[in-house]
Every structure is written in structure tokens, then in C-alpha cells.
Amino acid sequence: MTSQNSKTSNRWLQPRRVTVIAMHTFTQLVRMKVFYFLSVFALIVIAANFLDLPQFNGPEAIGVGELQMLKSTCMGVMKLFAVVFVIAATALLLPKDVEDRTLYTILAKPVPRLDYLVGKIAGVLLLVFVSLLLMDLLMTVVLSFRTNHLLVDQLSWAEARGWTQEAIDSERRDIIAQGPTWSFQGAVFAIFLQSAIIGAVALLLSTFSTSTLFTIILSFLIYLIGHFQADAADYYKATAEAGSNAFTTTMTKLLSLIFPNFQLFNVIDAVIEGIPMTMNAIISLTGLSLFYVVLYTMLSWFVFSDKEF
Amino acid sequence: MTSETAVEIRDLVKDFRSPLRGVKAFRAVDGVSLRIQAGEVYGLIGPNGSGKSTTMKALLGLVAPSSGTCSIFGKDSLKVDSRNDVGFLPENPYFYKHLTGAETLRFYGKLCNLRGKLLENRVTELLELVDLTNARDRRLGGYSKGMLQRIGLAQAMVQDPRLLILDEPTAGVDPIGSRQIRDLIMTLRDRGITVFLCSHLLEQVQEVCDHVGIIFQGKMVKEGRLDDLIAIEDQTEVVMKNASPELMEKIRTLVEQEESATLLRMGKPRTTLERLFLRETQIDKK
Ligand SMILES: Nc1ncnc2c1ncn2[C@@H]1O[C@H](COP(=O)(O)OP(=O)(O)OP(=O)(O)O)[C@@H](O)[C@H]1O
Ligand SMILES: [Mg+2]
């Protein structure tokens, strides 16, 4: 009466098992009706599309400003959704499994605890990714529609004014730079990366915190600290004697290891302003995010492997 | 039947540290040792809070022993490999509400590396076995307590393990369902599957278990083969069917004629395990 699976090894991070847990987490979240949020997003995008803009830059800048406004509203919402969602979902799911004792039934199967953790975070991130993808699609459609519309408007307006061909071309370039560029897609991807990091932070916190509320609040705090820590580090460096204080430099380095430096994600704002994002920037952001996600997941595992229920 | 050891627990001690009260740890399990041979049905009984569930959790690696060791088929419980051949039904089981009965079994099956046609057949077979075929596509959020218990039992058996650990398998199940579970355990025993269960329904424990351990305040107070435990050596029981009062009277006079023998009682046989249980757990209270 030997089961056929008793021979298969139970090494860590077996892709199939992690996928099973990730897909299960994904379904769980979908059935919690998370996607309803997307309809709210659609409404916001449409509303933002019809928003009237105060004219602060003179008539020739209106077009560019309108597009920026649309992008910054929508990306703000996307970022808010991604961060709030990733923190809430990660902070809720793990304690829920412990409380409901569903975790017993999973860990009583040949499932290494690392696989469980990785599966959970992967499931949450998959949902964030899919949501962002859908929002990005909607956003791209609206933005390109709007850009084309503006292009026609502004250029005919410029021609009527008797602008030189050079000026018109530059105006056209300016408008297109604000449209749905690859940099724009890169910025959306950066939002995903940022939420992945903060999700891993929430995962780590939820492995040792006893209350979901504590996890959520602390995760948001770390998110904020991540935004300000580079400023703080600069300030520190400026006040301390330049180069002479080894302690401060070590502390800053340590701080940046523990708290992710979210200032690197300011490229998102730059993209909203129409500044292109380089491939290098995307690659280094991906590398950095991967580093933090792996670091925090390993730390979570370290805590979780000794945990009792 | 093979004489392989299915479960071995040696001098298990489990202390729970209280985060609030700090220093004083609570000893939930105190030096419990037990061994279950493959093919046996072992029943662990004891009052509430005596450490039954904690012992089971330690065996599954859900809690780490403070000292002592646990192993399943020779594999240390703290290693993932020990869980290949074991199915567990926790007390008051609670599963993912958003999944249907079939999806639940599929999920646990996949965690055990089952897939494809094999998995689908297994799911259907198990739903049939625990009498939930009708509720196959209903979400667990709408299951009753007894139904949850039964889907939990099916979930434990999904990879056809050689050992089943059942923490109060019949809690909350109606008399008919609980009889079905008892019958199921007997069928499993006939197929050579080892069962380690704990229950407060002593009558059922007496019916299905070969071995019984009584645990009280974290200590194993009595352990052994059920037949040996409840046999009273200097007494003999005669159980008859359709005995007439005249016959009983004859026996009474016969016994009276005998010098060394005394008749203690006549009447209907009782659940002796229950009496043993009460005796063992009351002596220690004093
Ligand atoms: N995680 C924990 N932290 C602290 N104490 C615990 C923990 N788990 C169990 N205990 C304590 O250990 C003791 C044994 O608990 P256990 O659940 O093993 O009892 P049990 O025999 O299964 O009881 P029941 O019949 O009520 O299910 C109890 O006093 C309980 O309070
Ligand atoms: Mg119990």
C-alpha cells in the first residue's frame, strides 16, 4: 500500500507546488471580488478625461498639461491601488490561514514552509500584476485617443497662428512624448515592482506580528520611510563631517538595506512629466526590487520556519 | 500484517511559553511516549486540555517539541518528507470557504503531487466515500459542520496515505454520519492503513481501536492493547442471549455452591472503557 508519490523528493521551491499555492491564492482573492475595484478605476479614468484644466501655462501648453494631468491622476490611482491592495492582501491572508487552521491542513501535506510563503506572495503579486495590466490597457487606450485628438487640435491651432514648421514639429514631439510611450509602460511596471517590494515587507511583518492591523500600519510606515530615507541620509551626510564619520556611513548603508529606498521609484513621476525612462533604469529597478523581494522573503522564511500554530 | 513502526513518539515534552506572563511556561505534554505498529488503530483519549491535539501536532511537525522526538515511518516529523505518507484531519476543521468540495480536494491533491486523470478519479471516489457527491459543486462556505468534518476526512485521505491522524473525527457529526465514519475507519483498517485518532466518544473508541492510550494533564497514564486494558483478570464474564430467568436462577445457585467463586453482578454488559477512563483520570486528580 505504498503511495506512488512517496518517492518524489520534497525539495524546496518545487515550481509546480508553488504554482498550485499561488493560483489558489489568486482565485481566493478574485473570489473576494477584488476586481470590482477595476470598474471604479474605469470611472476615474473616464472622469479624469473630461476634467477641465486651469490654464496656467498659456494656451500652447494646455495640451501637454492636460495629458500630464490625466496621467498623474490615473497613475496615482494605480499606485494607490497597488500599494493598498498588496499590503492589505498580504497582511490578511497569512493570519487568516493561521486563524482558520487551514494552514494545518496545508503544512500537514508534504509542503515546505518556504513553498507556502513564496506561493502566497506570488499569488498576491500575480493579482496585482493582472490588475495593473488591465488598468494599463484601459489607460493606454484612453491616452492614445486623447493624444491623437490633441495633436489634431493643437497643430491646426498652431498652423492657423502661422507657426514655423520647426515650431510645429517640436510641438508635435512634445505632445507625443506625453502620450502612451514605452516609458509610460515602464512606469507602470515600476509601480508593480514597488508594490512587490512593499508586499514582501508586509509578508515579513505578518510572519511575526500578532495583529493584522499592526502589520498594515507598519507596512505603510515603512513605505513612507522608504520615500524619505534617502532625504534623511543626505541630510545626515551633510551634517556629519564629510567622509570622516564611518559610523554614519555604515548606518546609512544599513538603513538602506533594511528599508527599501523608494526614491529610485521617482522615475514614475518623471515619466508623468514626459521625461523618457531608459532601459537601464528599468533593468536596475528590476534588479533592486528582486534583491529586496528575495531578501524579505528569506527573512520571512527564517521567522516562519520556527513558528508554531 | 507487517510489523513496521508507523508512529514513534519518544519522551515528548512540549512547553508553551506565554508571551505575557513571561517566565512561567505551560507544560502541555509531559514525557509522552508511544509507538504504533503499521496497520493498527490507536485511540488517544483524555479530558479536555490534556494534550491530545498538541501531541498530534508535534507528530506532524506543526509544533516543535521542547524535547523528545517524533517520527512517522522512521522519518523525523520535523522533516517535510515525513508528511508524504500521512493524512491529517485537525479538530474543528475549517477550509477555504471560497472553494467547492471538489476544488478543495483537487487543491490538496495537487499539493501532494497528484494530477490529471488520476486526481480527478480520486476526487470523485473520495466524494463518494464521504457521501458528499451531491455537494460536490457547492462552496464550503455553505457546508454544515458535519459536512466540513467529512470533507476534511476526504482531504486527509487524498494521496492515499498509509497513516491517518484524526483529531476528533466524529465531533459535530450526526449519529448516522458518525457511524459511517466509524465504519470507514474499520474499512481502512482492513486495507492495512494505520489510524491514530483521538475522540471523546469512548464507545466508538472501544469499537474501532486495537490500542488505547489515556492521557491526563500531559502525561500518559495508561497504555496498551484495548483487550488487555479492559479485561479484569480475576473476573469472568458470561454473555448469553435469550437467557430465561429460570436459567439465571440455576446459575446463581450453582455459583453459590462453589467455595472460591462469588457472583458479582448479573445484567446487561457495560462500556467498560468508559469506567476505566473515569477511574484513571480521577485517581490522579487527588
Ligand atoms: N498554542 C498554544 N499556546 C499556549 N497553550 C497552548 C497552545 N496550544 C495548546 N495549549 C495548551 O496546551 C494544553 C493542551 O491542549 P490540547 O489542545 O493538546 O488539548 P486536547 O487534549 O486536544 O483538548 P481537547 O479535548 O479540548 O481538544 C491546553 O491546556 C492548552 O491550553
Ligand atoms: Mg484537541
Image: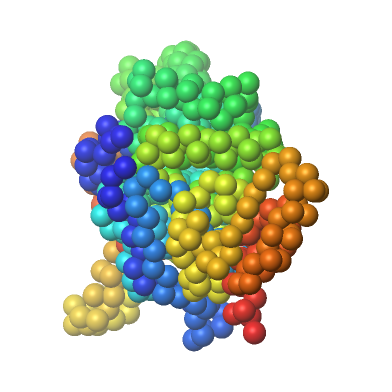
Above or below: residue A71 compared with residue A179: below
Quarter holding the N terminus of chain B is top left
Q: Position of residue B35 (x, y in %)?
A: 36, 60
Above or below: residue B1 compared with residue B44: above
Q: Is residue A268 left or right of residue B187?
A: left
Q: Is residue A139 visible?
A: no
Q: Position of residue A287 (x, y in %)?
A: 23, 46
Given residues B87 and A262, the one toward you in this image is B87
Q: How is the image coloured?
A: rainbow
Which residue appears at 22% of the width and 38% of the height? A7
Which residue appears at 63% of the width and 52% of the height? B238
Q: Is residue A139 left or right of residue A259?
A: right
Which residue appears at 73% of the width and 59% of the height? B252
Above or below: residue A245 compared with residue A191: below
Which residue appears at 32% of the width and 79% of the height? A239
Quarter holding the C terminus of chain B is bottom right
Given residues A61 and A182, the one toward you in this image is A182
Given residues B146 and A202, the one toward you in this image is B146
Q: Position of residue A179 (x, y in %)?
A: 41, 25
Q: Where is residue B145, by image quadrant?
A: top right
Q: Position of residue A227 (x, y in %)?
A: 42, 58
